[in-house]
Amino acid sequence: MRISHILASGAIFVLPIFAHADSICDGGSLVNVSGRLTTINTSPTRQAGQICITLTGANGKDVFDQCGAILGTVLTSNPATGMNTLSHTAVFSDAQSFTTKNDVAQITGVVAVDAAGVPCAFNVIEKITQISSATGIFKTGAVNITAVGTVSACPTKNLNNFTLSGKACIKTNDD
């Protein structure tokens, strides 16, 4: 796998930081997002795996807590900067799903190299700012979520792991 493909597959799941998190929620309920995701690289530009997220309301009670399937697609990759643009689709039970667009993943360091000394595992920070389509409790619009983790396309470990944190807006009973 060439370094540009490794850098492209280095992008998995990301979400951004807003100065005012409350401004992301127009006509819905603001929730805290936490969770994790694990994927494998199915090609230089695709990852597939599991996402587990918990959405917690302002009252501290969980309003959503499920694991589902996720598919990530690298849309653009800049090997010189280690920055990638992606989209993700996550599907949960009971017709709950969302698709993101223009997620930005930044490689922040090398974790491992292969036998030839070529970097094959990386630290990555990803930011997702936009849900472009959604069903169930999820709402289209701005989100503020950060994923921090590692991406590996090393011959002995094709596995990517991230933790998720941030804010999102969910539908209310009026939606």
Image: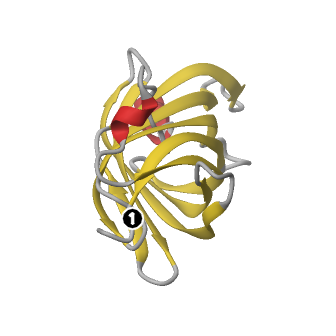
Color style of the picture = secondary structure
Question: x, y (%) of residue 50?
Answer: 60, 64
Mark 1 Cα shell of 10 Å, populated few (<14), some (14-19), many (≥20): few
Q: How many numbered marks have been drawn onto this rendered protein structure?
A: 1
| Rendered view: 6 above or below 34 | above
**In the image shown, does 82 or 119 lie closer to the viewer?**
82
Q: The C terminus appears in which quarter of the rendering? A: bottom left
Q: Quadrant of residue 56?
A: bottom right
Q: Quadrant of residue 130?
A: top left
| Rendered view: 19 above or below 1 | above
Q: Which residue is mark 1?
A: 172
Q: Please name the residue shown 35% across and 33% down the image.
A: 23
23 left or right, relative to 29: left
Q: Please name the residue shown 44% across and 31% down the image.
A: 21
**In the image shown, does 164 or 137 lie closer to the viewer?**
137
Question: x, y (%) of residue 81?
Answer: 40, 15
Disc 1 residue type? Thr
Question: x, y (%) of residue 47?
Answer: 48, 55
At numbered mark 1, what does the secondary structure look like: helix, strand or loop? loop
**In the image shown, does 93 or 43 lie closer to the viewer?**
93
Which residue appears farthest toward the bottom when viewing the image? 94
49 left or right, relative to 89: right
Q: Please name the residue shown 50% across and 41% down the image.
A: 167
Q: Please name the residue shown 37% across and 63% down the image.
A: 171
**In the image shown, does 18 or 127 lie closer to the viewer?**
18
